[in-house]
Image (cartoon, rainbow, N blue to C red):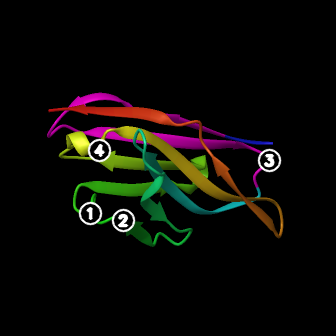
Amino acid sequence: QVQLVESGGGLAQAGGSLRLSCAASGSIFSINDMGWYRQAPGKQRDLVAMIGSGGTTNYADSVKGRCTISRDNAKNTVFLQMNNLKPEDTAVYYCKMTITTRWPLASDYWGQGTQVTVSS
């Protein structure tokens, strides 16, 4: 079994910063992509940022220049540093990892979500 646990969400003022973390635990052989998604009320879940196993990153246009995704492979953890927060960043943030538990079979795993609320 694999479990993803997120932390770091909360309430912030516009212009402020938050740092999200997501740690994977369980029977893990390797982790490929790690990413963050968000879902605002009444909207679909969208990609915020993704980082590959080699460190290649990809960001949504709406967060480029304001967010930085990073990973600690030794700790099976992905981070999302969010700066200059805007009210439109308010959403539930989910981490997702593509994890191989038994080579070569890989599956996507999701965290439970953490609420980020940005006040104007």
Secondary structure beneath dot 3 equals loop
Picture disc at residue 59: 2
Three-letter amino acid code at the position of disc 1: Lys
Q: Residue at x 82, y 70 (%)?
A: 104
Q: Are marks 3 and 4 in contact (CB under 8 Å)?
A: no
Residue at numbered disc 1: 64
| Left or right: 109 as drawn, with respect to 64 | right
Q: Are marks 1 and 2 in contact (CB under 8 Å)?
A: yes
Instruction: Say which label, 3 or 4, has the lower sequence index.
Output: 3
Residue at numbered disc 3: 27
Three-letter amino acid code at the position of disc 2: Tyr
Instruction: Say which label, 1 or 2, has the lower sequence index.
Output: 2
Secondary structure beneath dot 1 equals loop
Nearest the eye: 39 or 108:
39
Q: Is 87 situated above or below 56? A: above
Secondary structure beneath dot 2 equals strand
Picture disc at residue 89: 4
Q: Are marks 1 and 3 in contact (CB under 8 Å)?
A: no
| Left or right: 39 as drawn, with respect to 28 | left
Q: Is residue 83 magenta?
A: no
* Percent position of residue 73, x then y: 57, 56
Secondary structure beneath dot 4 equals helix
Three-letter amino acid code at the position of disc 3: Ser
Sort mark 4 into few (<14), some (14-19) or many (20+) by Cα contacts within 10 Å.
many
Three-letter amino acid code at the position of disc 4: Asp
Measured in 3D between alpha carbons, the distance from the residue under mark 3 to the one under mark 4, in whole angstroms, is 33 Å
Instruction: Say which label, 3 or 2, has the lower sequence index.
Output: 3
Measured in 3D between alpha carbons, the distance from the residue under mark 3 to the one under mark 2, in whole angstroms, is 29 Å
| Left or right: 52 as drawn, with respect to 60 | right
Q: Please name which of the two marks, 3 or 2, marks the residue nearer to the observer.
A: 2
Q: Residue at x 39, y 49 (%)?
A: 80
Task: Specify start and end residues of the magenta stretch as a single range.
Answer: 4-28
